[in-house]
Amino acid sequence: MTSPDPTPGTLTIPDITGLDTMAAAFAYAKHGWHIGPVRPGTKHPGSILGRQWQSQTTRDPQVIADYWMTHTDAGIFLHVGRSGAIVIDVDTPANLPDVLTDALTEHPAPFQRTRRNDAARRHYIYRQPHGRTLGNGLGQLPHGWGDLRGSNGVIIVAPTPHPDPDPDGHYTWGRTGTIPELPTTISDLLTDTTRPVDVASDATIRDFITLHNQGTDHGKARAMIATYKKAITAGDSRHQRAISILTGMLKEAAAGYYPAGHAEAELRTVFLDAVATPGHGQQGTARTGHQALEEWRGILAWAIAQASHANPTTTIERAEDHGPRDLASLIDTRPTPTAAPVEHDVPAPVDDTTDPAPVELEAPTSLDRLLDPTTTTPTADTPTPSWRPLDLTRILDGTYTPPTPTIMTRTDGHALFYPGKVHTVYGESESGKSWIAQHATVETLHTDGRVLYIDFESDAPDVTGRLTALGATTTQLLSTRFAYVRPEASPTTFHEAPDFQQLLNQPWNLAILDGVTEALGLSGRSTMDNDEITAWMRDIPRRIARATGAAIILVDHVVKSAEGRGRFPIGGQAKMAAIDGTGYLVEPISALGRGLDGSLTVRVAKDRPGQVRAHAGDWRKTDRTQEAARVRVDSTAEDGTTRVTVQPPEFGEIHARDNDTPFRPTRVMEKISRILETMREPISRRALYKAYRDTGASAKETTVAEATNLLIEGGYATETEGPRNARMFRSAAVYRSANDALSEDYRGDLGSFSTTASDRLPTVSDRLPGDGADRLPTTVSHRPPFTGDGDGRDGAQPTLNTTTVSHLNKSTGEIHTGSNPQ
């Protein structure tokens, strides 16, 4: 059953019937509760979050997801005090005093049963009385019935399994709904806590910032900010130093020096910028914008809890006695360490005799968004939830039109890139991949389209120079139809996020992301971690495509080694798996550059919609790619312009493997042939396989056996009988897969292969007398073909229609083979 959406600012127990722990955690957070994960079998709130668990409880759905994805079996605890609640925990119902019995009856509240066979053992949930902070003390209430869970309290909640070994233990909600305020008949018997709480509730934070909104001594605030900057530049913990500085600033705000909202907003900005980059010393790694903001919420809750209990008189005395008088003394003039994060400029010293204009507090809605990450304001642009079932009517009623590529059109009218899809173009350095993206850019501008160019590798002069050479006009590049971005930070950081959102709010026909490896690095993602690549693809390229409708072109690299390259860009395979458009491998045919008339081939390695392959060319077996276009890049014009022509593939017919053709391990055959060519004497089956594995190759023994049999059948090797009926092999001719018409490496008639005399002469020590040239023995064994297992004693040798004869030229060492009809 789904609970209705809560009214903002209320505290509610949702109906979690049928939900697992992670889904229930989301529901609790949505209804106002700060929650945390707890290990199975324990009630300790720090069992997962550690000693500082009080500031790590959260209402943020993304943080909750991270908690439960890491700890899939975790239970749930409610951080009662931080959520603004108090719990009456009844352990011995028979001892419940009348005042509590009457209050619980007259003011019913949501409650949770904790035992199957004792329905009266319950957790009753109430809100803290407004303006008060009740702790865990019983005050004037009698003892022996149970406990109160107040400002620093927690309770374990359903559907978490009960940690007690008693099988009777069980958590289940007996009543859900809105949390009422604690009845005065109970609150009047309780006293407010006298010690600072670990973290303040959202209500306490709002009250504190609203109450302490006076003062104009902004010089003191700037001095505290400068102290923070100097400390973290020197390597102090950005988190711990933020706690101490913010606590001090809020104490000064409570003493009337400057508004608390101003202090919070100013230090928050500096903190979020600082943790967006990797730290040095004890500062840890970079945080995403989401992580940093959630971390700040915990810091703020802790700092206000301490400042709320500070003595303003003591604060004033300390500020007057120890407050810095010269702001310039806080500015570190030493060179910043190389590994230190880039800091914002520290404000120059100012004349404190003239008060600057007061800084206005953030609007309440902004404060609500800071405190409550679940708060959203639906707009016309709010996306439909992705887990909502899709309406398939338009797809199945015949009106659906499959996506068709419309960008980068060939001379025959067919195009390469689909609107609204993510594509990748990858190749070696200087292979021409950026020319592809830039030609698509100019083509789009010429058709009055809009282009977003996000450049992670080059710079504005280089990119605009190429676009101009390709035919883009100054008017086009300066218009609102073209935007060039050169990011230096992740778009999710605090200061970058608004501008990134502005880009998402505009329609684009084409978006270029040039430099995927650098883009991943800016976002703190690994190029080898498939989970991180998938997250980046979802958060950046696919988000741009969904929000703007643009065709996305990712420009990427391949590994340097041609042998280990495969079909994918450099890094994790998720780079290709996350593509919902096409993936293109770019290979140069001739050199590209100023003053050159070069060309390249664009080969399609992935085509999710399937419209490009239908008009592509040859299917290359080695990497399963097809030529999608031949591109000529002519930069020989004297005026510096470059002309790009996108032509259809060189060949139109698609060549696919004939499934009826037996597998032919031609590359293994070549390796075996090369081994036999270097042997002075015949070699046994086992010795041949060992020599093959010693080369670092890894084909199975059965494959090596099949390759050897094929070499014998083709006349490239001979077989004789050795000691104890062993099968012995030696070279009879040179085999190369590139000269085999049945090989996927076949490159046509390359002429006969030959080896040098020094390579070949030692292998023919048992030459047979012949007429003019020595003849090598033909196959004499009557055994079946070598299978790789056993001696091969069973079966019959196939009958051959020809006899293979090999001749050695004594002068050159070349071996010539031929066939004599039988």
Image (cartoon, helix red, strand yellow):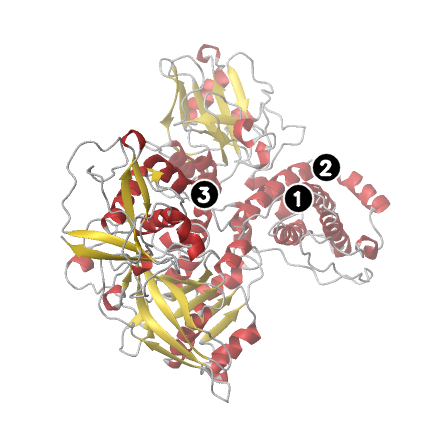
Q: Which residue is mark 2?
A: 310
| Residue 252 relative to residue 395: left or right | right
Q: Are marks 1 and 3 in contact (CB under 8 Å)?
A: no
Pointer 3 local density, CA inside 10 Å: few below 14, some 14–19, many at least 20: some
Pointer 1 local density, CA inside 10 Å: few below 14, some 14–19, many at least 20: some
The amino acid at mark 3 is: Pro
Q: Residue lying farthest bottom?
A: 638
Give how far apart the Cα atoms at labels 3 and 2 are: 33 Å
| Place of residue 383 in the rendered image (x, y in percent of width and height, measured from the top left) | 36, 56
* Residue in the picture at 31% in, 64% down: 747
Q: Which residue is mark 1?
A: 283
Pointer 2 local density, CA inside 10 Å: few below 14, some 14–19, many at least 20: some
| Residue 140 relative to residue 821: left or right | right
Q: Are marks 3 and 2 in contact (CB under 8 Å)?
A: no
Q: Which residue is mark 3?
A: 61
Q: Nearer the viewer, residue 388 or 765?
A: 765
The amino acid at mark 1 is: Gln
Nearest to N terminus: mark 3 or mark 2? 3
Query: Looking at the picture, does residue 112 appear above or below residue 395?
Result: above
| Residue 625 relative to residue 35: left or right | left
Q: Are marks 2 and 1 in contact (CB under 8 Å)?
A: no
Query: Looking at the picture, does residue 297 appear above or below residue 616?
Result: above
| Place of residue 726 in the rendered image (x, y in percent of width and height, measured from the top left) | 29, 33
